[in-house]
Image (spheres, rainbow, N blue to C red):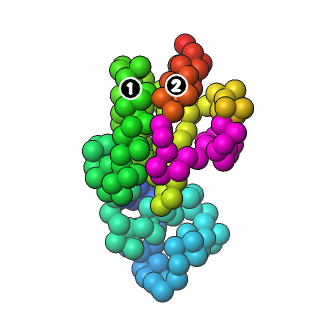
Amino acid sequence: MAVKSGNREAHFPAIEKKYGEKITHWISLLKDFEGTKYPEQVAFLRENYGFSQAHANALVMHVRGSTSSKRFDQPKDFFEKLDPEAAKTAKQIFKAIQTKYPKLELVIAWNQPMLRLDKDYVFGLSVAKKHITLAPWSTEVLEKFTPKLKDYPVNKKTFIVPIGWKVDAPLLQAMVRARLAELK
């Protein structure tokens, strides 16, 4: 069962039940790998003990001192951590969409800001040092708009714009309209 709180310790009862040892056992095993990198520690648990990625991640990150996978409680917290130019562009992207679609709720999911209608995700973004990755939450929508995205790198589920992008509100609104049509 997925852990919604972000609390890594919430995984511990399932880990104990599934892998047959107390958490103290697994923590002491990982203490022997203290100088190794995260991927090596996760691989150790997965390859030697059959851990799932989620359980291995929760345990390794707990041992490394991270008690929660949740970094932001609300979008405001996300924007405050960004470079001012990136924050300005990201806010403009959401404003361009929400001006046309005010019923979309701006939430944090997977530590990123996302627009949601009820329980369905409609549009999201992720900010890197030099670019913003935009996600229309639909490969079909992305494929439909690929000709209009010829000036941007397009991946399987996302496209990339520069940090100082002049927001193309009509493009974003059309993509969201197409995504909402899929959800009906």
Q: Mark 1 points at which residue?
A: 98
Kind of element beneath mark 2: helix
Is residue 158 inside the magenta stretch? yes
Task: Mark 1: give few (<14), some (14-19) or many (20+) Cα within 10 Å.
Answer: some
Amino acid tagged 1: Gln
Residue 95's spot in the image, x, y percent?
A: 37, 31
Task: Mark 2: give few (<14), some (14-19) or many (20+) Cα within 10 Å.
Answer: few
Answer with left or right where residue 63 lies relative to residue 151. left
Magenta segment: 149-167
Please name the residue shown 39% across and 73% down the image. Answer: 63
Q: Which residue lies furthest to the top in this view?
A: 184
Kind of element beneath mark 1: helix
Could you say which is closer to the camera, residue 84 or residue 158? Answer: 84
Q: How many labels does the image show?
A: 2
Q: Name the residue under label 2.
A: 170
> Quadrant location of the C terminus?
top right
Could you say which is closer to the camera, residue 152 or residue 47? Answer: 152
Residue 55's spot in the image, x, y percent?
A: 49, 59
Amino acid tagged 2: Pro
